């Protein structure tokens, strides 16, 4: 495995900040490694740090391939993570999702999409290319976490009101 | 919320064959013994495997470490948050100063308890029982406790038997207890 580059984006939250971590792999594909609060990223930092230590992960920006070097590398990156809005500036994003059995949040989102002329395709799902920041701002204001590939649970612990149905397309990120 | 306290850890290593035994002394921050007024703590077998597996094991705990769900015990009652980097450095140092593998069964008494119903036994496990000439009892179980005083014997045993499994008709558990009071 190879990690040619990485990007870390930070979404400021009312309770805690969340991060999106993506890497450019050996196939020149940007893939999502992890997303969530800072501590949760260490699940992947731990797994990948062990791979670095064991010689299974090559990281271009590391001069010394040790577990410690990998952690320091990411601690530094976490400290200077880009605002999440920059993700939309830096990457194209195709997303496909359905709005399931709408609660009030889902209903409001549907209204917003309708007002912007977005129409679901035949199977009822929405396909958006580079969703405008307005959508993201709406989701954020309503405490619906939107991340590429997944929609996280809402803060009240209820199941997600809508989910992406085609996560594959979400992984196909391409840099500007 | 309760979290795990690490009181001690020991690494045993065979330099030639890349075999590591990693044991940990653990407790909980919010469990107290009513008689001693101290937190109870026990030694657990964390893993037996290669150095690569050792780092995977350590790596898999970093989320809990960074999130404060695993902390370092200090003295009898205190504890201290340690971050991911400190954790890795600690275990790097422990690995560098690993004890000889054969010391493991000198430091710990090791017992292996098993109770597996013959009908619930995989072919591999049945072959293992056959290899050791262990027979089914009158209730239809392979059931006994086996004690190990030699690390080499233990490692051979664990090539065939899981260090832990827990099912309705299949229970296998490896226990370790320190032989020395200072541990």
Image (cartoon, coloured by chain):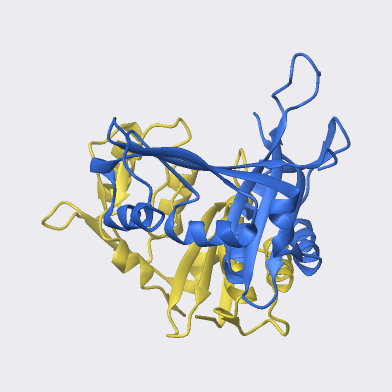
Residue B86 image-quadrant placement: bottom right
Residue B21 image-quadrant placement: bottom right
Residue most toward the right?
B75
**Picture layout, residue B1 above or below residue A12:** above
Say whether residue B96 is left or right of residue B61.
right
Pick the front one: A84 or B138: B138
Q: Position of residue B167 (x, y in %)?
A: 36, 37
Residue B84: in sight, yes or no?
A: no
Q: Position of residue B117 (x, y in %)?
A: 30, 38
Chain B rendered in what hue? blue
Pick the front one: B158 or B89: B158
Residue most toward the top?
B34
Q: Position of residue A90 (x, y in %)?
A: 51, 73
The residue sitting at 47% across, 85% down in the picture is: A26
Say whether residue B92 is left or right of residue B61.
right
Q: Position of residue A136 (x, y in %)?
A: 44, 52
Pick the front one: B34 or A153: B34
**Picture layout, residue B121 above or below residue A41:** above
Chain A rendered in what hue? yellow
């Amino acid at each position: 495995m190879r990690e040619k580059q990485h990007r870390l984006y930070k979404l400021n939250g009312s309770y805690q900040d969340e991060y999106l971590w993506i890497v450019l792999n050996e196939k020149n594909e940007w893939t999502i490694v992890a997303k969530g609060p800072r501590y949760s990223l260490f699940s992947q930092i731990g797994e990948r740090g062990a791979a670095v230590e064991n010689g299974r992960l090559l990281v271009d920006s590391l001069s010394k391939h040790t577990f410690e070097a990998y952690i320091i590398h990411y601690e530094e990156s976490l400290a200077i993570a880009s605002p999440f809005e920059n993700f939309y500036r830096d990457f194209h994003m195709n997303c496909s999702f359905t709005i399931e059995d709408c609660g009030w949040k889902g209903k409001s989102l549907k209204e917003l999409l309708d007002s912007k002329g977005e129409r679901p395709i035949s199977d009822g799902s929405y396909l958006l290319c580079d969703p405008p920041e307005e959508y993201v701002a709406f989701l954020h204001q309503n405490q619906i976490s939107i991340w590429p590939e997944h929609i996280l649970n809402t803060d009240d612990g209820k199941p997600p009101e809508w989910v992406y149905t085609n996560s594959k397309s979400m992984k196909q990120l391409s840099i500007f | 919320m309760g979290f795990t306290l690490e009181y001690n850890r020991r690494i045993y290593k065979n330099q030639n064959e890349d075999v590591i035994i990693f044991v940990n002394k653990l407790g909980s921050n919010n469990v107290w013994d009513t008689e001693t007024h101290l937190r109870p703590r026990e030694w657990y077998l964390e893993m037996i495997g290669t150095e690569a597996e050792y780092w995977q094991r350590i790596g898999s705990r970093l989320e809990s470490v960074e999130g404060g769900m695993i902390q370092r015990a200090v003295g009898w009652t205190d504890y201290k948050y340690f971050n991911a980097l400190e954790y890795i450095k600690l275990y790097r140092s422990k690995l560098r100063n690993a004890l000889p593998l054969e010391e493991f069964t000198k430091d710990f008494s090791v017992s292996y308890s098993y109770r597996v119903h013959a009908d619930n036994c995989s072919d591999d496990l049945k072959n293992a029982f056959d290899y050791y000439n262990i027979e089914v009892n009158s209730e239809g179980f392979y059931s006994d406790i086996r004690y190990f005083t030699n690390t080499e014997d233990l490692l051979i045993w664990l090539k065939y038997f899981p260090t832990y499994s827990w099912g309705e008709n299949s229970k296998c558990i490896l226990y370790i207890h320190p032989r020395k009071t200072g541990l």
